[in-house]
Image (cartoon, grey):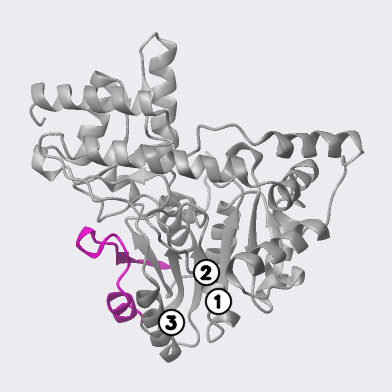
Amino acid sequence: MLETVASFDRIGEENAFAVLARATELAAKGRDIINLGIGQPDFRTPGHIVEAAVQALRDGAHGYTPAVGILPLREAVAADLHARYGVTVSPTEVMIMPGGKPTMFMSILMFGEPGIDILYPDPGFPIYRSMIEFTGARPIPVPIREENGFAFSAEETLSLITPRTRLLILNSPANPTGGVTPKAEIDKLVAGLAKWPKVAVMSDEIYDHMLYDGEKHVCLLSYPEIRDRVILLNGWSKTYAMTGWRLGYAVWPGKLYDNARKLAVNLHSCVNAAAQFAGLAALTGPQDEAEAMVAEFDRRRKVVVDGLNRLPGVSCATPKGAFYAYPNITGTGWKAKPLAAALLDEAGVAVIGGPDFGVLGEGYIRLSYANSTENIVRALERMATFLAERKAA
């Protein structure tokens, strides 16, 4: 009998894909399923981006590219970061990645090993904890609390750092909560990190274009005092509705860049050539469709929050970013995962239970409003009927 190494017993997964599979299975059987579970825009990739990829293929972009990505795209990333945040980034710090997860994987792999602590947001993207445990490091949850606006607390985060801590993972705007951490709190965190010069920071900023109510994104690269230990994660998936293109980027400090380059050579060789030309068109071309998509998410956000707060036993804080609502369902009497399962099987509404995003997720479910307003309203009506008729299991 074949046996894998013990570390594979520790690896987790992202349950949103399991919910998607179940929803797809039910739909194939003729059920009318409204999917508010999966975190991807329901918009098409803008046409000029698609055409750039098609043209690249016609022009012969069929071979390998440099492992770190084509230079024009890395230059465009650097220029975009400077234009939006005033930070100076060299193309030699930018690496094009096949999506966002490889940056998480590489960052955690570089720092994680037995005897080491890695701090991560909880509730948060499930792959953080999965990869930490895979390396044998100890995952230390940084509580993301509703009473704090689903922002991290600098004081609480700093209190969790010890001489064992090697990496801190941050995410704002955040998945699954839609929380946005204010600049004043980030300022406090950065000041406190002066005491811990050996702690690296991976800042997941994949939703940085998706903010509402006048919120402004704070890029961690804008702090010179920690610039030499910040790993920036970003990409095209959410901003340009390009989830299936598998295109992301990272900005790596110092010698970590060459470590990441070597991992890329060993892991994926390079990123799809035509997709890179599509990414170039996205950054350098018109932004009107991307902006219109965020404006539509804002309209849906208001519908979702208003509708959720009308449901019996449910309360929902207003998310400030991303395209997720994270309602508190403790008043319904249901545990989160049984409620999510029952809503899918009985009401035909796919949502994700809070515990799928961390040990502190009980009492919440996540809804993605990356679906039409019509479907969102229908889903809320079904949820209202379900909660009125069904007592907690």
Q: Nearer the viewer, residue 81 or 359?
A: 81
Q: Which residues are magenta?
A: 137-161
Q: Residue at x 92, y 38 (%)?
A: 59
- Can you tell which quarter of the image residue 360 is in? bottom left
Find the distance from the CA under tag 1 to the CA under tag 3: 11 Å
Residue type at numbered disc 1: Ser
Q: Nearer the viewer, residue 353 or 55?
A: 55
Which residue of the protein is positioned furthest toward the right in this rendering?
Answer: 59
Sort mark 3 into few (<14), some (14-19) or many (20+) by Cα contacts within 10 Å: some
Residue type at numbered disc 2: Cys
Q: Earlier in the sequence, mark 3 or mark 2?
A: 3
Find the distance from the CA under tag 3 to the CA under tag 2: 12 Å
Q: Earlier in the sequence, mark 1 or mark 3?
A: 3
Question: Is 146 part of what is drawn in magenta?
Answer: yes
Disc 2 element:
loop
Q: Residue at x 65, y 74 (%)?
A: 256
Q: Residue at x 48, y 80 (%)?
A: 199
Q: Which mark is residue 190?
A: 3
Q: Position of residue 156 (x, y in %)?
A: 27, 76
Find the distance from the CA under tag 1 to the CA under tag 2: 6 Å
Q: Is residue 368 visible?
A: no
Q: Which mark is residue 222?
A: 1
Q: Could you tell me which quadrant the C terminus lies in? A: top left
Question: Is 139 part of what is drawn in magenta?
Answer: yes
Question: Pointer 1 and pointer 2: residues touching (CB < 8 Å)?
Answer: yes
Q: Which mark is residue 80?
A: none
